[in-house]
Image: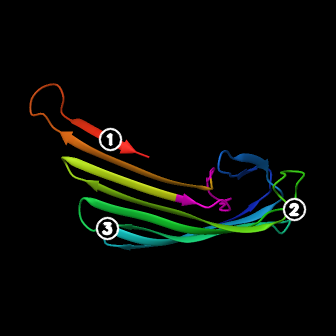
Amino acid sequence: YTALVAKDRGTGSVIVPDTDFSTFVDAPSEATDFIGRARRDIGNNFVSVLVTDRENRDGSYNRVIGPDFQWRPNDVDSITGQLIYSSTLDPDRPDLFSGWQGEKRSGHAAYVSWSHQKPTHDWFFQAQDYSQDFQADQGFVPQVGFRSAFLETGRTFRPKEGFLSRIRVWGQAN
């Protein structure tokens, strides 16, 4: 487990994420920050819980909580995932950012990936889903409001003679 508590004087910037671009805004006030993670290893696998909390002096806050895991059912496959939930009360500071109207919102972020690695071929799949109202002030999440999927596969050849020791032909799709 890990836990960190810090007092923030509010002299930095906050990332306000959106679908197309993010905005850097001056931090609204002093804050108390907490970041914690508890992880349990089970053989080559693990499960854990992540918690972050930013309590601003003006009463606004951002809280994030959720599990993540990695499962390795054999020597060639690995499945990793995370599902986190955020609850945010925006500052009532339209003078700093027009979107800060003191509103409460919540959102989720989900990630899953599968990797299959053999000497002659490989597969990789990744999917993400970030709701429009998800926010993680303690983490670097510059984009929200999107879903994506990515697939890559490859075939590897290992010539026994010559200059090249490995040739990999691959394809991918988004």
Q: CA distance from mark 1 to mark 2?
A: 48 Å
Q: Residue reaching furthest right?
A: 95
Which amino acid type is marked by label 2? Asp
Can you see residue 38? no
Whole-percent x, y for residue 54 in the image: 72, 65
User: Which is nearer the N-term, disc 1 or disc 2?
Assistant: 2
- Element at label 2: loop
Front-lying residue, 1 or 174: 174
Front-lying residue, 31 or 21: 21
Q: In the shown orientation, is residue 106 left or right of residue 43?
A: right
Q: CA distance from mark 3 to mark 2?
A: 46 Å
Q: Quick check: 74 above or below 25? A: below
Label annotation for residue 171: 1
Q: How many marks?
A: 3
Q: In the shown orientation, is residue 105 left or right of residue 129?
A: right
Whole-percent x, y for residue 5 in the image: 67, 67
Q: Which residue is mark 2?
A: 92
- Magenta part of the chain: 129-143
Residue at x 15% of width, y 37% of height:
158
Which mark's residue is nearer the viewer, 3 or 2? 2
